Amino acid sequence: MNSATDALTKLFGATQRIVFLTGAGMSTESGIPDFRSPTGIYATLTSEDVFDLDAFLAQPERFYALAMRLLGGMRDAKPHAGHLAIAALAREFGKQVTVVTQNIDSLHQDAGSPVVLPVHGTWETSHCLRCNATAATRDLWPSVEAGRVPRHENCGGVFKPDIVFFGEMLPAAVLAEAGNALRAADLLVVAGTSLQVYPAAALPGLRRSACSLVVINQTPTPLDAQASLHFAGPVGEILGAAVAQLRAG
Ligand code: OAD
C-alpha cells in the first residue's frame, strides 16, 4: 500500500457526505471502451457520428449499426472492484454516498450503490418517438441484431434509447439533485472522466471550499491542480485498495 492510498482511506474514514463524479474511465476495467483515450470510441468516430440527435432522427439505422458494434459488449459487463468499493462505502460503512455518473451503463446500480444520478441518461430503457411508450432496451436488441431499427409494434414509431444525445437537454431533476449533493459534500471524488463535456464538467465547481477533492484519472484533467489527492492510475484498483484498507481498519 502506498501513502496516497493511505491518505484516500483516511479521507473515506473521516468524511460522511461523499460524492463520486464518474465517467467512461470508470467502466474501462469492466471492458467498456471510453471515448477520448487512444483506444476510445472517438479514436475513429466523432460525437456527431454517434450521439447526435439530428443524425439519429435522420438515420436511426446508422446509429443502431454503430451502437451494436460499440455498445453491444455493455450488456455482458460486470461491475469491478471500484464500483463495488463505492457501493460498500454506503452499504457497509454507512456513508451518505451520491454517485453522479455520466455513464449510460448501469454498473454503479448493479454494484449496489443506493443513490445513482445518471446525468447522461441510461441505456436500460428506450421510448417510442411517436407514442412515447417505454421499453426495456434489451427487449429491442434482437431486432437491432437482425439489422432492423426497433419500432413500436402498434404505432410504428422509432425507439430511441433514453440516453442524452448532443442536442438534448440533460434531465433537469437529476441535474438539480446532483447539484444539491455537490453543495452538501464533504468529499468529492472525480473518477474516470476527462471533464470535457458540460454541464457535467461544471458540477465540481459547486462544491464548498471545505469539501476535499480527489481526482483519479489516467490522463490529466483540468481539476488536477485543485485536488488534495491525485492518482494517475486505474480507478478500480485504487478504490478497491482504499476501501479494502478501510475494512481492514
Ligand atoms: P472520456 O473518454 O472523455 O474520459 C475518460 C477518462 O478516463 C480519460 O481521461 C481516461 O484517461 C480515463 N480513464 C480510462 N480508463 C481509466 C481507468 N481504468 N482508470 C482511471 N482513468 C481511466 O469520457 P467521459 O469524460 O465520460 O457523452 O466523457 C464525457 C461524455 O462524452 C460522455 O458521457 C459521452 C461522451 O460524448 C454523451 O454521450 C452525452
Image (cartoon, rainbow, N blue to C red):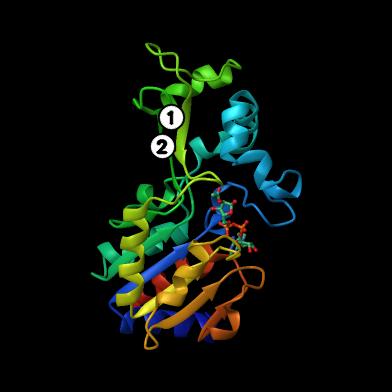
Give the residue pinned by disc 1: 137
Q: What residue is pinned by disc 2? A: 124
Quick check: is the Cβ at mark 2 less than 8 Å away from ligand 1?
A: no
Determine the quadrant in which ligand 1 lies.
bottom right
Q: Is 234 displayed left or right of 8 in the figure?
A: right
Quadrant of the rendering where the C terminus is positioned: bottom left
Q: Which residue type carries mark 2?
A: Glu
Residue type for callout 1: Thr
Residue at 29% over, 76% down: 184
Q: Indicate the quadrant where residue 122 lies.
A: top left
Classify 10 Å Cα crowding around label 1: few (below 14), some (14-19), many (20 and above). some
Seen from the viewer's position, the closer of residues 119 and 70 is: 119
Image coordinates of residue 93 in percent, x first then y, are: 26, 70
Point out which mark residue 121 bears: none
Question: Residue 146: which quarter of the image?
Answer: top right
Question: Residue drawn 53% across and 61% down?
Answer: 198
**Which secondary structure lies at badge 2?**
strand
Q: Secondary structure at mark 1?
A: helix
Q: Nearer the viewer, residue 36 or 81?
A: 36
Q: Is residue 172 visible?
A: yes
* Residue at x 70% of width, y 46% of height: 46
* Image point (36%, 54%), residue name: 172
Position of 85 with respect to 222 (left or right) is left
Q: Where residue 174 sits: x, y (%)?
A: 34, 55
Characterize the local packing of mark 2: few (<14), some (14-19) or many (20 or more) Cα atoms within 10 angstroms: some
Q: Is residue 95 above or below residue 227?
A: above
